[in-house]
Amino acid sequence: RLWVAGCSPRKVAQAELISSDAAALGRNLLGALFKPDEIVKGNCTPSRHSLLDQDVIQGIRMHINYRFPVQKDQEHDRWKTIVQGTMNSKCRTAQLKHNFLYIISKKK
């Protein structure tokens, strides 16, 4: 289970309650296990942004496979196409909101 990696069982349970599929669970765990400023500065895959803690990301991946089991050969495809894309999208959205609020604050 995910809290073995040092994550709070309470945060994991709250994320599980509001998640109906693997992508939603990944997105909710990302928000529960990382601080907002880490999400703004980071990403799940190598890019121009720094990587989020890969041990926690791997824990999220394993927990998704535990909660929503699929065939072993489908795990990688689901992670790459659905879950990781959703989590990266959450990071990009946080970055856009942060940049927008920064621009608005400079105009005042």
Image (cartoon, rainbow, N blue to C red):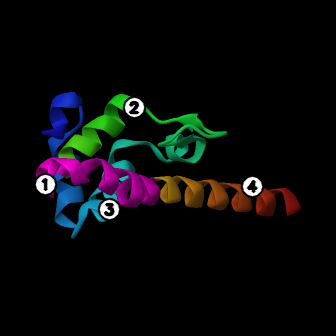
- The secondary structure type at the circle numbered 3 is helix
| Label pair 2/1, CB-CB below 8 angstroms | no
- Secondary structure type for disc 1: helix
**Which residue is at a point 63% across and 61% down the rendered structure image?**
97
Q: Kindly report which numbered mark, 2 or 4, lies closer to the viewer in this rendering.
A: 2
* Quadrant containing the N terminus in the rendered view: top left
Q: Is residue 2 left or right of residue 106?
A: left
- The residue under label 3 is which amino acid type? Ala
Q: Amino acid at mark 2?
A: Gln
Indicate which label's residue lies in the foreground, 1 or 4.
Answer: 1
Chain-order first, disc 1 or disc 4 = 1
Q: Nearer the viewer, mark 3 or mark 4?
A: 3
Amino acid at pointer 1: Arg
Q: On the image, numbered disc 1 is attached to which residue?
A: 67
Amino acid type at circle 4 is Tyr
What label does residue 54 carry, if any? 2
The residue wearing badge 3 is 23
